[in-house]
Image (spheres, helix red, strand yellow):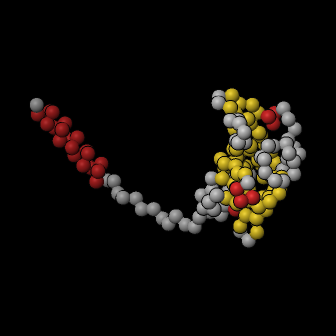
């Protein structure tokens, strides 16, 4: 019985030492939000295009030449301005040129074209350390999800 008491006392003492050694960690300032517009602006070409419906996927870019596609996102004075798409190879169903913007400049989840004419969901975007813009969209007429990975030139 004495051994059990000694073990309990030692365990309680070890627990107290463990708790006493934990200090509250202080974090520095978060800083200014990172600019999203400048890194997103530029000319993009297709790296891959995948169509998915349910559990079935088809990588279109393995069988179709999409090298003629490009998307240009322009900015002026730190704000999104105009865009141009120079081909119909990818079914974005938007005008070939117009204005673009993010749905939220601090935490964008979509790129909006022509004040809501069309949009794509952002999956990944270039922020200075990566040149890929990954978007998903579903044309309103079907349930197929298009995943478009674009590489900034």
Q: As rendered, which of 118 and 60 lies closer to the eye?
A: 118
> Viewed as shown, does residue 38 lie left or right of 153?
left
Q: Nearer the viewer, residue 116 or 13?
A: 116
For residue 53, side relative to residue 64 (left or right) = left
User: In percent of the image, x 29 and y 50: which residue is there?
Assistant: 19
Q: Which residue sits furthest left? A: 1
Residue at the (14%, 33%) spot, across then down: 3
Q: Residue furthest bottom?
A: 77
Residue 127 position by quadrant: bottom right
Count of marks, rendered view = 0
> Image point 79% across, 34% down: which residue?
60
On the image, the x and y values in percent for residue 104 come to 62, 60
118 sits to left or right of 8: right
The quadrant in which the N terminus is found is: top left
Q: x and y percent of residue 113 in the render?
A: 74, 56
Q: Is residue 140 above or below residue 19?
A: above
Camera-nearest residue between 27 and 144:
144
**Taking 121 as reference, is 24 above or below it?**
below
x and y, in percent, of residue 109 in the image:
63, 53
In the current view of this chain or complex, which residue is farthest to the top?
56
**Residue lying at 36% horizontally and 58% vertically, measured from the top left:** 24
């Amino acid at each position: 019985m004495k051994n059990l008491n000694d073990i309990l006392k030692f365990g309680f003492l070890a627990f107290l030492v463990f708790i006493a050694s934990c200090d509250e960690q202080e974090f520095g300032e978060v800083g200014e939000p990172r600019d999203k517009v400048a890194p997103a602006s530029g000319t993009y070409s297709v790296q891959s295009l995948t169509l998915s419906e349910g559990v079935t996927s088809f990588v279109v870019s393995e069988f179709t030449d999409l090298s003629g596609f490009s998307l240009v996102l322009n900015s002026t004075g730190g704000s999104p301005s105009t865009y141009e798409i120079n081909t119909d190879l990818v079914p974005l169903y938007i005008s070939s040129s117009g204005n673009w913007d993010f749905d939220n400049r601090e935490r964008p989840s979509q790129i909006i074209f022509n004040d809501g004419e069309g949009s794509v969901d952002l999956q990944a975007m270039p922020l200075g350390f990566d040149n890929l813009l990954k978007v998903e969209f579903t044309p309103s007429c079907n349930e197929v999800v298009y995943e478009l990975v674009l590489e900034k030139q």
